[in-house]
Image: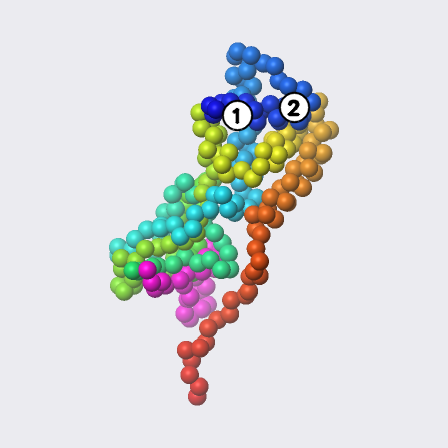
Amino acid sequence: MAAIDDIQELAQNVYFTVNNAENDDTGDELTAFQNNFIRAFNLWVKEFEEEADWNRARVNDYVLATITNVTTFSFTLPDDFRTPVFDINKELKFINDGVVVARFVLVNPNQRQVDDEDVNPNRATFIPIGDSGGTIVLSRVPTAEELTSTIVLDVIRAFPKLTRTDTEVFDYLYSSTITTLGIAKNVALSDVTKVSLSPSFAQKYKNELDKAIMVNNATNAVDDMRMDDFSSIGSF
Protein backbone atom coordinates (compact mmCIF):
# COMPACT_ATOMS: atom_id res chain seq x y z
CA MET A 1 0.00 0.00 0.00
CA ALA A 2 1.38 3.40 -0.99
CA ALA A 3 2.01 6.03 1.68
CA ILE A 4 -0.81 8.24 0.41
CA ASP A 5 -3.26 5.33 0.73
CA ASP A 6 -2.39 4.96 4.43
CA ILE A 7 -2.78 8.71 4.84
CA GLN A 8 -6.15 8.68 3.08
CA GLU A 9 -7.42 5.89 5.34
CA LEU A 10 -6.46 7.78 8.51
CA ALA A 11 -7.84 11.04 7.09
CA GLN A 12 -11.17 9.36 6.42
CA ASN A 13 -11.25 8.00 9.99
CA VAL A 14 -10.81 11.51 11.36
CA TYR A 15 -13.38 12.96 8.95
CA PHE A 16 -15.91 10.28 9.88
CA THR A 17 -15.30 10.81 13.60
CA VAL A 18 -16.04 14.53 13.28
CA ASN A 19 -18.76 14.45 10.60
CA ASN A 20 -20.26 10.95 10.85
CA ALA A 21 -19.81 10.63 7.08
CA GLU A 22 -17.17 9.74 4.49
CA ASN A 23 -15.39 12.43 2.53
CA ASP A 24 -16.25 12.05 -1.17
CA ASP A 25 -13.80 14.55 -2.69
CA THR A 26 -12.10 13.67 -5.98
CA GLY A 27 -9.41 15.18 -8.16
CA ASP A 28 -7.90 18.44 -6.93
CA GLU A 29 -10.35 18.60 -4.04
CA LEU A 30 -9.17 15.17 -2.84
CA THR A 31 -5.55 16.34 -3.03
CA ALA A 32 -6.43 19.42 -0.99
CA PHE A 33 -8.29 17.25 1.54
CA GLN A 34 -5.23 15.03 1.95
CA ASN A 35 -2.82 17.98 2.19
CA ASN A 36 -4.98 19.66 4.82
CA PHE A 37 -5.05 16.43 6.81
CA ILE A 38 -1.25 16.10 6.63
CA ARG A 39 -0.95 19.64 8.00
CA ALA A 40 -3.42 18.88 10.81
CA PHE A 41 -1.56 15.67 11.61
CA ASN A 42 1.84 17.38 11.83
CA LEU A 43 0.41 20.05 14.13
CA TRP A 44 -1.08 17.42 16.44
CA VAL A 45 1.87 15.03 16.43
CA LYS A 46 4.19 17.64 17.99
CA GLU A 47 1.70 17.86 20.85
CA PHE A 48 1.65 14.06 21.22
CA GLU A 49 5.43 13.73 20.89
CA GLU A 50 6.08 15.84 23.98
CA GLU A 51 3.57 14.05 26.24
CA ALA A 52 6.12 11.37 27.19
CA ASP A 53 9.49 9.85 26.35
CA TRP A 54 7.87 7.30 24.07
CA ASN A 55 9.65 3.94 24.04
CA ARG A 56 9.11 3.59 20.29
CA ALA A 57 11.32 6.65 19.78
CA ARG A 58 13.96 5.68 22.32
CA VAL A 59 17.60 4.91 21.49
CA ASN A 60 19.59 3.31 24.30
CA ASP A 61 23.35 3.82 24.62
CA TYR A 62 23.61 6.35 21.82
CA VAL A 63 27.21 7.33 21.10
CA LEU A 64 27.25 11.12 21.18
CA ALA A 65 30.97 11.67 20.51
CA THR A 66 34.49 10.42 21.07
CA ILE A 67 36.70 12.45 23.39
CA THR A 68 39.66 13.78 21.40
CA ASN A 69 40.93 16.61 23.61
CA VAL A 70 40.86 17.97 27.16
CA THR A 71 39.33 21.36 26.32
CA THR A 72 35.91 20.61 24.83
CA PHE A 73 33.04 20.20 27.29
CA SER A 74 30.01 20.79 25.03
CA PHE A 75 28.77 18.41 22.34
CA THR A 76 26.04 18.68 19.70
CA LEU A 77 23.00 16.42 19.87
CA PRO A 78 21.84 16.10 16.23
CA ASP A 79 18.37 17.31 15.30
CA ASP A 80 17.34 13.69 14.65
CA PHE A 81 16.83 13.61 18.44
CA ARG A 82 14.46 15.59 20.64
CA THR A 83 16.02 15.16 24.08
CA PRO A 84 18.24 13.00 26.28
CA VAL A 85 16.41 10.76 28.74
CA PHE A 86 16.17 12.50 32.12
CA ASP A 87 15.70 9.80 34.76
CA ILE A 88 17.09 9.08 38.22
CA ASN A 89 18.57 5.80 36.96
CA LYS A 90 20.06 7.11 33.70
CA GLU A 91 23.34 8.99 33.33
CA LEU A 92 25.67 10.24 30.65
CA LYS A 93 28.76 8.02 30.70
CA PHE A 94 32.33 8.02 29.45
CA ILE A 95 33.14 4.49 28.28
CA ASN A 96 36.62 3.25 27.40
CA ASP A 97 37.18 -0.33 26.20
CA GLY A 98 33.79 -1.31 27.58
CA VAL A 99 34.50 0.13 31.04
CA VAL A 100 32.60 3.10 32.46
CA VAL A 101 35.28 5.60 33.52
CA ALA A 102 33.01 8.53 34.43
CA ARG A 103 29.34 9.20 35.08
CA PHE A 104 27.46 12.50 34.74
CA VAL A 105 24.02 13.12 36.20
CA LEU A 106 21.70 14.94 33.78
CA VAL A 107 20.35 18.08 35.43
CA ASN A 108 18.62 21.40 34.81
CA PRO A 109 21.01 24.02 33.31
CA ASN A 110 20.97 25.95 36.60
CA GLN A 111 22.35 22.90 38.39
CA ARG A 112 25.25 22.09 36.06
CA GLN A 113 27.68 24.00 38.27
CA VAL A 114 26.67 25.25 41.70
CA ASP A 115 28.64 28.37 42.56
CA ASP A 116 28.91 27.82 46.32
CA GLU A 117 30.11 24.21 46.09
CA ASP A 118 33.83 23.70 46.70
CA VAL A 119 33.88 20.54 44.60
CA ASN A 120 31.45 20.29 41.70
CA PRO A 121 30.17 16.76 41.01
CA ASN A 122 30.01 15.39 37.48
CA ARG A 123 26.91 16.86 35.89
CA ALA A 124 25.61 17.40 32.36
CA THR A 125 22.78 19.47 31.00
CA PHE A 126 20.90 19.85 27.73
CA ILE A 127 20.28 23.14 25.92
CA PRO A 128 17.59 22.52 23.27
CA ILE A 129 17.49 24.32 19.94
CA GLY A 130 14.04 24.58 18.36
CA ASP A 131 11.90 21.45 18.21
CA SER A 132 14.83 19.02 18.09
CA GLY A 133 18.56 18.82 18.62
CA GLY A 134 20.65 20.96 20.91
CA THR A 135 23.82 20.95 22.97
CA ILE A 136 24.98 18.69 25.80
CA VAL A 137 27.15 20.70 28.20
CA LEU A 138 29.32 19.03 30.85
CA SER A 139 30.29 20.49 34.21
CA ARG A 140 33.98 19.94 33.47
CA VAL A 141 36.38 19.19 30.66
CA PRO A 142 37.58 15.60 30.16
CA THR A 143 40.84 14.54 31.75
CA ALA A 144 43.86 13.14 29.94
CA GLU A 145 42.97 9.68 31.28
CA GLU A 146 39.55 9.94 29.60
CA LEU A 147 40.87 10.61 26.09
CA THR A 148 39.51 8.23 23.39
CA SER A 149 36.50 7.41 25.57
CA THR A 150 33.08 7.50 23.94
CA ILE A 151 30.28 9.62 25.41
CA VAL A 152 27.16 7.49 25.75
CA LEU A 153 23.62 8.29 26.85
CA ASP A 154 19.99 7.35 26.19
CA VAL A 155 18.07 9.69 23.87
CA ILE A 156 14.62 10.14 22.35
CA ARG A 157 14.28 10.47 18.58
CA ALA A 158 12.41 13.42 17.14
CA PHE A 159 9.27 12.35 15.30
CA PRO A 160 9.68 12.77 11.53
CA LYS A 161 7.11 14.83 9.64
CA LEU A 162 4.33 13.17 7.70
CA THR A 163 4.48 13.80 3.94
CA ARG A 164 2.58 12.44 0.96
CA THR A 165 5.39 9.95 0.32
CA ASP A 166 6.69 9.23 3.84
CA THR A 167 4.66 7.70 6.68
CA GLU A 168 7.58 6.69 8.91
CA VAL A 169 6.06 8.69 11.76
CA PHE A 170 3.17 6.21 11.95
CA ASP A 171 5.65 3.70 13.44
CA TYR A 172 6.12 6.01 16.46
CA LEU A 173 2.42 6.25 17.33
CA TYR A 174 0.69 4.30 20.08
CA SER A 175 -2.56 3.52 18.21
CA SER A 176 -4.78 4.75 15.39
CA THR A 177 -7.51 5.49 17.96
CA ILE A 178 -5.44 8.00 19.89
CA THR A 179 -4.29 9.58 16.61
CA THR A 180 -7.85 9.88 15.31
CA LEU A 181 -9.16 11.43 18.52
CA GLY A 182 -6.20 13.77 18.89
CA ILE A 183 -6.61 15.24 15.43
CA ALA A 184 -10.42 15.25 15.72
CA LYS A 185 -10.36 17.38 18.87
CA ASN A 186 -8.13 19.96 17.18
CA VAL A 187 -10.09 20.00 13.92
CA ALA A 188 -13.42 20.29 15.75
CA LEU A 189 -12.10 23.12 17.91
CA SER A 190 -11.14 25.13 14.81
CA ASP A 191 -14.52 24.60 13.13
CA VAL A 192 -17.22 26.94 14.49
CA THR A 193 -19.94 24.48 13.47
CA LYS A 194 -18.23 21.57 15.27
CA VAL A 195 -16.68 23.36 18.26
CA SER A 196 -19.30 21.94 20.64
CA LEU A 197 -17.94 18.45 19.89
CA SER A 198 -14.38 19.31 20.91
CA PRO A 199 -14.80 18.79 24.70
CA SER A 200 -16.09 15.27 24.04
CA PHE A 201 -13.18 14.44 21.73
CA ALA A 202 -10.74 16.04 24.19
CA GLN A 203 -11.99 13.90 27.08
CA LYS A 204 -11.89 10.70 25.03
CA TYR A 205 -8.42 11.64 23.79
CA LYS A 206 -7.19 12.29 27.33
CA ASN A 207 -8.48 8.88 28.43
CA GLU A 208 -6.62 7.17 25.58
CA LEU A 209 -3.51 9.27 26.18
CA ASP A 210 -3.45 8.39 29.89
CA LYS A 211 -3.66 4.69 29.01
CA ALA A 212 -0.87 5.03 26.46
CA ILE A 213 1.42 6.80 28.94
CA MET A 214 0.67 4.16 31.59
CA VAL A 215 1.61 1.36 29.19
CA ASN A 216 4.70 3.26 28.02
CA ASN A 217 5.92 3.71 31.61
CA ALA A 218 4.94 0.27 32.90
CA THR A 219 7.51 -1.34 35.21
CA ASN A 220 7.82 -3.89 38.01
CA ALA A 221 10.47 -1.88 39.83
CA VAL A 222 10.32 1.27 41.91
CA ASP A 223 12.88 4.04 41.42
CA ASP A 224 14.91 4.38 44.62
CA MET A 225 16.47 7.67 45.66
CA ARG A 226 20.21 7.49 45.07
CA MET A 227 22.31 8.40 48.08
CA ASP A 228 25.90 9.63 48.16
CA ASP A 229 28.45 6.86 48.53
CA PHE A 230 30.78 7.51 51.50
CA SER A 231 32.23 3.99 51.63
CA SER A 232 35.68 5.25 50.66
CA ILE A 233 35.98 7.34 53.83
CA GLY A 234 37.90 5.57 56.58
CA SER A 235 37.20 5.85 60.31
CA PHE A 236 39.15 8.22 62.59
Q: Is residue 194 visible?
A: yes
Q: Are marks 1 and 2 in contact (CB under 8 Å)?
A: no
In which quarter of the view is residue 146 placed?
bottom left
In this view, the residue farthest toward the right is 196
What amino acid type should be assigned to the residue bearing mark 2? Phe
Lateral position of residue 168 relative to residue 36, left or right: left
Q: Which residues are magenta?
A: 98-122
In which quarter of the view is residue 149 placed?
bottom left
**What percent of the width, then of the height, locates residue 223?**
55, 61
Q: Residues within 10 Å of mark 2 (few under 14, many from 20)?
A: some
Type of colouring: rainbow
Q: Is residue 195 above or below residue 108?
A: above
In this view, the residue farthest toward the top is 27
Residue occupied by mark 2: 16
Q: Quadrant of the C terminus?
A: bottom left
Q: Is residue 29 above or below residue 197?
A: above
What amino acid type should be assigned to the residue bearing mark 1? Ile
Task: Specify the label residue 7 is tagged with.
Answer: 1
In which quarter of the view is residue 230 placed?
bottom left
Label 1 vs label 2: CA separation? 14 Å
Q: Helix or strand or loop: what does disc 1 sit on?
A: helix
Q: Is residue 71 visible?
A: no
Lateral position of residue 106 relative to residue 200, left or right: left
**What percent of the width, then of the height, locates residue 153?**
41, 53
**What percent of the width, then of the height, locates residue 184?**
64, 29
Q: Quick check: is 115 in the magenta stretch?
A: yes
Residue at 69% from the left image edge and 31% from the top image edge: 198
In this view, the residue farthest toward the bottom is 236
Residue at 41% from the left image edge and 60% from the top image edge: 104
